[in-house]
Image: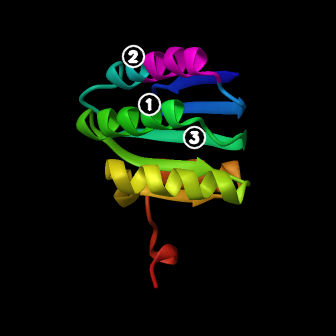
Amino acid sequence: MYELQIDRGHAIVDFILDGYIRVEEMQRFVADLRVATQSLTGREIKIKADLRTFKPASPEAAQMIREVQEFGLRSGVKRVAELVESQIVALQLNRLARESGTDKILRRFWEEASARQWLIHGDTDDDKP
């Protein structure tokens, strides 16, 4: 199952992937994510991906995730915040992010509030070493 919302005020595409996502459902999700991203064209687009209950993706679904990440980069996505709890999912997502180039704009969070704060405000002086 997935949910997708757009915060137009902050140009954030906010989605949740929950459980095992069948290939057909992943195709619908990717199509919806592309439309949502395109609806914010011309802005500094941010993505908040809640993957805390997402189960490891099939190779076909993983390929779709990589392709939509590449699409996001081409479409102006500037920051991606992921909420992840599973180490297995984190490893899979790390590989996909490296392959797509998303790793350069990605940060992982444990809490939704801190993820949203970073998406809206970016790095603050407190975040820098």
Image disc number at residue 64: 1
Residue 122 as seen in the image, left or right of residue 104: right
The reply to whether the magenta stretch includes residue 30 is yes
The reply to whether the magenta stretch includes residue 59 is no
Name the spot of residue 54 as percent of width and height, x first: 70, 39
- Amino acid of disc 3: Ala
Which corner quadrant of the image does residue 68 belong to?
A: top left
- Amino acid of disc 2: Val
The residue where tag 2 is placed is: 35
Residue 26 as seen in the image, left or right of residue 122: right
Closer mark to the observer between disc 2 and disc 1: 1
Look at the image and give the residue range highlighted in magenta.
Answer: 22-33
The residue where tag 3 is placed is: 49
Mark positioned earlier in the residue sequence (3 or 2): 2
Residue 11 seen in render: no
Mark positioned earlier in the residue sequence (2 or 1): 2
In the displayed structure, 62 sits above or below 102; it is above
* Farthest-out residue, front: 59
Mark positioned earlier in the residue sequence (1 or 3): 3
Residue 119 seen in render: yes
How many angstroms separate mark 2 from mark 1 (CA)?
Answer: 15 Å
Q: How many marks?
A: 3
Q: How is the image coloured?
A: rainbow
Quarter occupied by the N terminus: top right
Few, some or many C-alpha atoms within 10 Å of disc 3 (few <14, some 14-19, many ≥20)?
Answer: many
Q: Secondary structure at mark 2?
A: helix
